[in-house]
Image (cartoon, rainbow, N blue to C red):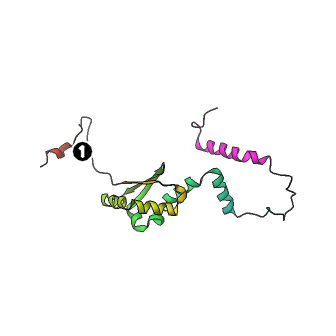
Amino acid sequence: MPNSTSRSEPERVFLHLKALFSSKSTTRKSNKDTGKPFEAGRDPKPVSDVLTDLTEKLGWENVLSESDLLENWADVVGSEVASHSTPQGIQNGILTISCDSTPWAAQLRLMRNELLERINLVQPNAQIKALRFLGPDVPTWKKGLRSIPGRGPRDTYG
């Protein structure tokens, strides 16, 4: 039997759901359940309540909140900030944000606490602990296999 790290994600989800719900399928009908349609506890539940219960039971609140944060970035930080920044992903509670210019990356670094507070207010289940800002990619002077470390051609200027 392969270990849990070598299994595919769908297989792990299936096994998790099977373990979660298989124990309850045998005890579905209790002695108290007489099958009468209008007894207490027999009322239908809204789908939103059922889905909320399911995501809590499966432990998906964190993942779904992270996905909502990435998807609704403009609603969380505002249209001005969102037009100059793009969330790249979340890893270990650190949200990586790429900015379209170096000044915007510097400005957002100054606004780090305000943005973090707003993110945790809107999506508390995402559990964002820190923000990492990336500026645009800059050209490199390193070319070829025989390049050496150091400042490159700029060290002869001035």
Question: Can residue 73 be seen in this snapshot?
Answer: no
Determine whether, in the image, residue 23 is placed left or right of residue 78. right
Question: Can residue 30 be seen in this snapshot?
Answer: yes
Number of marks present in the image shown: 1
Taking the spot 51% from the left edge, 55% from the top edge, the residue there is 127
The residue closer to the viewer here, 76 or 144, is 76
Q: Quadrant of the N terminus?
A: top right
- Say if 20 sits above or below 67 in the image: above
Task: Give the crowd class for mark 1: few <14, some 14-19, many >=20 residues within 10 Å.
Answer: few
Query: The residue tagged with tag 1: helix, strand or loop?
Result: loop
The location of residue 104, given as percent across then percent down, is 33, 61
Q: Residue furthest bottom?
A: 79
Q: Quadrant of residue 61?
A: bottom right
Determine whether, in the image, residue 13 is placed left or right of residue 99. right
Is residue 8 on the magenta stretch?
yes
Is residue 35 on the magenta stretch?
no
Q: Quadrant of residue 87?
A: bottom left
Which region is colored magenta? 4-32
Residue ID for mark 1: 141
- Say if 78 sits above or below 51 in the image: below
The location of residue 10, given as percent across then percent down, is 61, 44
The location of residue 77, given as percent across then percent down, is 44, 64
- Say if 31 sits above or below 48 in the image: above
Taking the spot 80% from the left edge, 51% from the top edge, the residue there is 28
Q: Quadrant of residue 80?
A: bottom left
Q: Amino acid at mark 1?
A: Trp
